[in-house]
Structures are given as structure tokens and as C-alpha cells.
Amino acid sequence: MARILTGIQSSGRPHLGNILGAIKPAIELSKNPQNESFFFIADLHSLTTLKNGTERVEYVRAIAATWLAFGFDYKKNVFWRQSRVQEHTELGWYLNCFTPFPMLANATSFKDKSEKLADVNAGLFTYPVLQAADILLYNANIIPVGKDQKQHLEMTKDIANRFNILAGEEILVLPEPQIDERIMTIPGLDGQKMSKSYHNYIDIFLPENELKKITKKILSDSKALEEPKDPDSDITFQLYSLVASEADVETMRSNYVNGGYGYGHAKQALFECFMDVFAEPRRIFNYYMENTEELESILVEGEAKARDIAQDTIGKVRKVLGFSS
Ligand code: TYM
């Protein structure tokens, strides 16, 4: 039996990149009866960039509602908020003391973020250590994530290994990332990686007219309607090919190649595809965003299960480190 674990930061509402890159693949894996799934909301991580508590509450709900909207079975599996299981921060501290400074200083995501953000805080620097704690607390084997998380997973293994060497036995289980090659990096409106911090994301839960407006903003070149176009270098086509059926993608491909088909047509087709493919998730998402007490009780139930497992691991770690008698 494999234990699957992944998390999403509550630094904004989830976008199409999170959904296609992490949420949907994780839910697919969770449907295998051989697997046990641990999906959580990384609200502590979101503090590295988001300081406003009221917004955090809203975004935590939106992320929880998205997991449920895409069919996560919270009864069979484990579903929780990171901040409600204090063992995450405790293990995070211990692991800080097993993490070489240069490993963090050379992390690509830290370098990227510290170039772009005004608030370069210590939490941002030690972000991968808390992520390692999230994973190692639960003895997780497989971590479905987008390509941007590959280095964090390598660090997790390295940190766990250093701890295990001290312990003289494998107390912390070394996890493996699972990255779907086809959907490694979902492009945003401007063709860069879709990201909250680049403001280039598509929120598929927006009201219909706003979703249409956002879809129209996808960057395209200036080829005229009648000219043939290259589907593979076009962002609208790339996104369409990730959500539409194979037959519809082939039809759009020949429309591009033949000419007489404008980018406006392609964007309209993409918008209609979003409305069609995501109709049910949009309905469930709105239901939970309106019924927040129900959402809260689902999370509280999950947090009790998560805490039990986390306490078991932290007990072993404390013992090795001499923090328990
Ligand atoms: P976050 O919230 O930034 O991203 C959540 C997940 O979405 C994936 N993702 C993408 N995938 C494809 N294309 C994109 N444009 C795109 N943008 C985001 C990310 O790769 C990620 O899988 N550090 C994690 C949160 C976390 C975590 C963990 C994950 C905290 N602890 C433990 C796994 C295990 C993150 O980047 O979240």
C-alpha cells in the first residue's frame, strides 16, 4: 500500500495550474484502493507571502472546497489544515537543524521569489524545511506535485537521510515525487508558468462573465484571421489540449493549420470547454463556499486523524533527539 501526500498553499484561490498540476493527478491516485491519501492545506506556508488573516480564512476555504469539488473522498482519506496539527512546526524546527545553510541558499524557488518579492523573510528561506516536515511526519511514499516542486522533494530526501544517519535507523521514510510529464508546467495568460505571484492565472471558479473575460486575455501573436497558425506555440491551444477531448483538440489543430480561424474563435472554444468540463466542480465549489460550517466540520474530522499519525512520528523523533525520557 502506498501513502500519497500533497499540499496546496492558501496564498490565493486555487488556479488551473494547481488543479491540473497537483489536485487532479492526486485525486486520480487516491482512487486506487491500494493507496491511502493525505491531502492538506499549507496555510502556514502561505504566511511567507500573505499576512492578512481574513483573506487567509477565505483562501483556506477555497482550497478545501476545490479538493472536494474534484471528488476527494475525505472519509476514506485524510484531509486537514497544516496549522491545526502543531507537529508540523515542531518537526520543522528539528529538521532546520539538519539542513545545511547552502542547500537553502541555492534553492531555485527561493532565488526566484527573493528577486520578485519586497518581503524576503526568513520563513521564505526555510520554506522547504517545513515542507519536508509536512511530508516526513506522515511516512508518505508518493508526492504528486508540479515540476516546480522537484527540488523541494530532493531536499526532503536529503534532510531525512541526514536525520536517519544520526538515528542509525530509517525513522523517516524517503518519499518520491510523481510529476506527470504532459502537465509538468501549465502556462499562464502570458505563457510563463501559471502562478499566483505572476498574476497570470486562470481561476476556473469565477462567475461565467469574468471567466470569459480572463480567457480573452490569453496572449497570442498578431496573425490575421485568414492566416494559418502554429498550434503548438500558442498558449490558448496548449491550454485547450489539456482540458478538451482528443477529438476536439484535433479539430482545433486543423483549424489552426488551415487558416480562416482566429485566436478569438479559439479563446471562445476554450471558455466554452471550461464551462462544460468544470460544470460539476463549479457547482460543488460554490456549495461549500456557501456552506462553510459543513466544510469546517469535514476539516476538523480530518485533523483528528492527521494528528494521531503525526504524534506517532514526532514521538520517535523526540526520543532520538533526547527530547523525551
Ligand atoms: P503551491 O500552492 O504553490 O502549488 C500547489 C501545487 O500546484 C502545482 N502547480 C503547478 N503545476 C503545474 N503548472 C503550474 N503552473 C503550477 N503552479 C502550481 C505545484 O507544483 C504544487 O504541486 N510548496 C507547495 C505546497 C506544499 C507541499 C507540501 C506540496 C507545502 N508542503 C508537501 C507537497 C508536499 C507548493 O508549491 O504549493
Image (cartoon, rainbow, N blue to C red):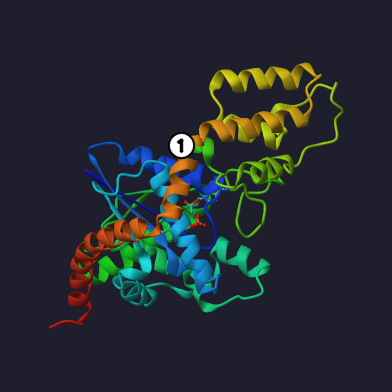
Which residue corresponds to mark 1? 280
Residue 140 falls left or right of residue 153: left
* Mark 1 burial class by Cα count in 10 Å: few <14, some 14-19, many 20+: few
Can you say which quadrant of the picture contains the C terminus? bottom left
In percent of width and height, residue 222 lies at: 85, 35
Q: Is mark 1 within 8 Å of ligand 1?
A: no
* Residue 296 vertical position relative to residue 122 in the rendered view, above or below: above
Q: From this viewpoint, is residue 144 visible?
A: no
In percent of width and height, residue 309 lies at: 21, 62
Residue furthest toward the front?
290
- Marker count (numbered): 1
Q: Secondary structure at mark 1?
A: helix
Residue furthest toward the left?
325
Which residue is more in the foreground, 151 or 220?
Answer: 220
User: Which amino acid type is marked by label 1?
Assistant: Glu
* Residue 122 vertical position relative to residue 143 in the rendered view, above or below: below
Q: Residue at x 54, y 23 (%)?
A: 245
In percent of width and height, residue 228 lies at: 81, 21
In percent of width and height, residue 276 lies at: 54, 31
Q: Residue at x 62, y 31 (%)?
A: 272
